[in-house]
Amino acid sequence: MNVEPWCPVAATIDTIAGKWKPTILLHLKNGPRRFNELRRLMPDVTQRVLTMQLRALEADGIVTRTVHDPEPPQIVEYAFAARGLTLGPILDAMVDWGETHAR
């Protein structure tokens, strides 16, 4: 039985991988955002996919979901959890690399 050794880079990629997760994180880096605000900032993402990506980030302890008003229409806000804040330097490095090399 061949077992792959644990790789910290793979663990990081696994946490932030997904078509929309890096973009969500970049928008949350500037502060908490409401769900519909994220939808407006990312017009190509579907509501279902955005919900799934946010739930995955929440399950990994990267973002928090706060319901400010339980009565419809609910006011739901997403923000970085303490663990998510540690991704700031990684996101900054990704922005810098993209601006330098991806154009």
Image (cartoon, grey):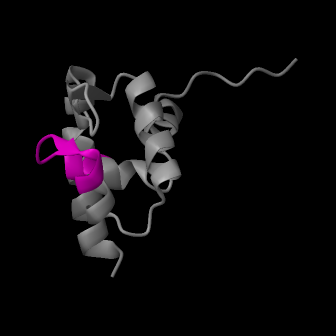
- Residue 28 percent coordinates (x, y): 21, 45
Instruction: State whether residue 98 is above or below residue 39.
Output: below
- Quick one: 22 or 39, which is closer to the camera? 39
Numbered range of the magenta stretch: 25-37
Q: Name which residue lies at 47% across and 33% down.
A: 56
- Residue 11 percent coordinates (x, y): 50, 30
Asked whether 30 falls inside the magenta stretch, the response is yes
For the N terminus, the quadrant is top right
- Residue 63 percent coordinates (x, y): 30, 30
Q: Name which residue lies at 53% across and 35% down.
A: 10
For the C terminus, the quadrant is bottom left
Q: Name which residue lies at 46% across and 53% down.
A: 47
- Quick one: 41 or 86, which is closer to the camera? 41
- Quick one: 16 or 101, which is closer to the camera? 16
Asked whether 80 falls inside the magenta stretch, the response is no
From the viewer's perspective, tell me whether residue 2 is left or right of residue 35: right
Label tally: 0
- Quick one: 64 or 99, which is closer to the camera? 64
